[in-house]
Image: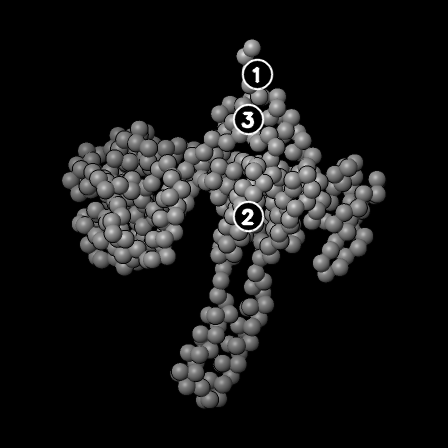
Amino acid sequence: MRGVLSLSSTSTLRIEEGFRVLTLRYPITDDVREFIEEYRALATHLYWCRRFGLEPDEEVIEKLWERVPSYWRWHLVNPRDPMYLFKGIEGTPMPHRTILRLPLVDALHESKGAYIKDGRLILRLNRRLELEIPRRALEWLEKRLAEKPDKKFVRVFERDGKLVVQIVLHKINKVEIPKDPLLVVVDINSSYGVVVHFWDGKLIKTMKFRPPNRGNRWRHVRDLMSHRDMLYNQGCLSQRQINVYDSLIRLTLRGSMKGWVQQSVARIVKRVRRMARRRGKESLVMVDKPSYDSIHGTPLQRTLYSFTKYLENSLSWYGIYWVEKRLYSSKCPVCGGKMVMIKRTRRTRIMKCVKCGFKEERDNIPLHWAIKHLTTLKGKASNHQPTSSP
């Protein structure tokens, strides 16, 4: 599973790795662009040599030492470097490009190639650059640094005519299955969007998150564009009035699926941590990851998969134990029989098992499966408890 490293096949203890990334964009000057392009060419040569088991050209190595500061070259030449760029490249797909867009990478530290001082980002590239960090970004970064990440490093590259700087924070947590957890069930495969249940001997709270309906927005945009073009062809609009229509179109389409994913995951993780503190327990999160067949080709395919990835990364960052489990919504949790819908309203969908007659609201059925899995996990945790010496 993503972001998880097991210590052994029998141990209930595992390592979760979480990341936080702050992306900043700045105007780029010609000399900095030329430096990054030359770095990419030199780094790409080392990549292909590593890929095909060849020795790098001596002239390329000399140029690397001559034109690239030491801050940015060790992750290219030293396989023991923690940020070595070419780890496991033999098993990765073959790139289509000849010159790769490889980033400059270094630790975020005053003695390295990048550091933060007085609210400004200092980069030592071909020359010293002092870049202003926006206030909101700086506040976010200070909060994440207060959570004590284990590693802090910087990625620098050029994209679409901009200098892009990514500050990456990496946190490693050792977690174990809680003995008496607060169970949190995240049904990402729900036709509603995402449904979250909190269970502690009884159902405490249910949260629902519906992805934004951009279809209605596009219909409004088409109407605005049609009305604007009709008035323009009749000579009834000035340029200022055309700009008003353009502003209305931008406001109508404001917001994105990515923003919805980030905001929804932040709300879920915040509520999980807060509720666990109030009840004096550790949380165990079961994630019903969407199956490929269930959402392939649907408008939500990319959104729900990115939701799963972002949620598991956030849980790993805070050291919250999570596990992916298949939680059915059309299979009876009592006898395993098929469930059919017997009643549907605007807010509810009642399902009934054709074998045993079990009835339940469709969005609540995954919770029953999660409770069954929780019993199994508790047994696994108790079987691995260390015995006390006499």
What separation in Å lies between label 1 and label 3 (alpha carbons)?
15 Å
Residue drawn at x 63%, y 44% as measured from the top left: 198
Whether residue 120 is situated above or below residue 283 in the rendered picture: below
Distance Cα–Cα, label 2 vs label 1: 35 Å
Residue on which the image places disc 2: 271
Looking at the rendered structure, the secondary structure element under dot 2 is helix
Q: Residue at x 51, y 83 (%)?
A: 230
Which of the two labelled residues, at mark 1 and mark 3, occupies the earlier sequence position? 3
Front of the two marks 1 and 3:
1
**Mark 3: few/some/many CA within 10 Å (<14, 14-19, 20+):** some
Residue type indicated by callout 1: Thr
Numbered disc 3: secondary structure: loop
Dot in front, 2 or 3: 2
Which residue shows up at 74% across the image and 41% down it? 331
Instruction: Answer with left or right where residue 254 lies relative to residue 76.
Output: right
**Do the CB atoms of the residues marked 2 and 1 lie less than 8 Å apart?**
no
Q: How is the image coloured?
A: one colour
- Secondary structure beneath disc 1? loop
The residue identified by callout 1 is 387
Residue 32 visible (yes or no): no
- Residue 306 vertical position relative to residue 243 in the rendered view, above or below: above
Residue 85 rendering spot, x and y as whole percentages: 33, 37
Q: Are the residues tagged 1 and 3 within 8 Å (C-beta)?
A: no
Residue 159 placement: quadrant:
bottom left
Task: Return the disc, 2 or 3, that comes first in the chain's sequence.
Answer: 3
Please tell me how crowded label 1 is: few (under 14), some (14-19), or many (20+) other residues with Cα within 10 Å.
few
Q: Is residue 18 left or right of residue 342?
A: left
Q: Earlier in the sequence, mark 2 or mark 1?
A: 2
User: Which residue is identified by label 3?
Assistant: 12
